[in-house]
């Protein structure tokens, strides 16, 4: 599915985050080349969540680097960047069928919060996960 995504569309999305109503924080895992990245937007894009909730808008690690601590380091960096900024919780959206990612998030204390939607580009169901920052 990711192979079918447009680089141009992704670039436009990043530009919107950088110039939009959200503040974006970007993290890059560089080990003799980029092996992963994460983006956190504040506040979360779902307005009903309020100003105290941040959102992991993207986290990706190259498949040949899975289970080597890269994703954990990126997630740890996103959480550390929010500490002291008054955020109470962190949310993210994950494709329902992405069991590997869902297990990764669950191992870090995230749980489904009951929100569901259809991802607009892929037309696949997504679930929202949430964690209280005080617990991680």
Image (cartoon, rainbow, N blue to C red):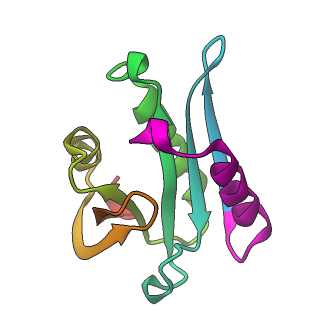
Residue 36 point in image, percent of width and height: 54, 30
Residue 35 point in image, percent of width and height: 55, 23
Residue 79 in view (yes/no): no
Q: Residue furthest bottom?
A: 48
Please give the name of the residue rendered at 63% of the width and 50% of the height, measured from the top-left corner.
10
Question: Number of callouts in the render?
Answer: 0
On whether residue 97 falls in the magenta region, the answer is no
SS majority, magenta: helix
Q: Which residues are magenta?
A: 1-23
Residue 7 in which image quadrant: top right
* 28 lies above or below 34: below
Residue 40 point in image, percent of width and height: 57, 56
In-image side of 117 versus 89 (left or right): left
Residue 10 in view (yes/no): yes
Pick the quarter of the image with the N terminus: top left
* 18 lies above or below 136: below
On whether residue 17 falls in the magenta region, the answer is yes
Please give the name of the residue rendered at 51% of the width and 57% of the height, measured from the top-left corner.
57
Please give the name of the residue rendered at 42% of the width and 33% of the height, measured from the top-left corner.
71
In-image side of 9 versus 129 (left or right): right
Residue 13 point in image, percent of width and height: 66, 59
Q: Residue furthest right?
A: 19
Please give the name of the residue rendered at 45% of the width and 26% of the height, measured from the top-left corner.
70
Q: Residue furthest top?
A: 32
Residue 14 in which image quadrant: bottom right
């Amino acid at each position: 599915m990711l192979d079918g995504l447009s680089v141009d569309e992704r670039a436009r999305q990043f530009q919107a985050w950088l110039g939009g109503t959200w503040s974006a924080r970007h993290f890059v895992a560089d080990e003799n080349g980029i092996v992963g990245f994460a983006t956190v937007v504040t506040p979360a894009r779902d307005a009903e969540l309020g100003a105290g909730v941040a959102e992991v808008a993207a986290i990706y690690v190259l498949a040949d680097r899975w289970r080597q601590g890269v994703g954990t380091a990126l997630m740890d960096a996103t959480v550390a960047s929010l500490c002291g900024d008054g955020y109470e919780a962190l949310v993210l959206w994950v494709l329902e069928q992405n069991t590997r990612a869902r297990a990764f998030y669950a191992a870090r204390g995230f749980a489904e919060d009951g929100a569901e939607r259809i991802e607009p580009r892929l037309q696949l169901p997504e679930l929202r996960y949430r964690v209280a920052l005080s617990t991680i």
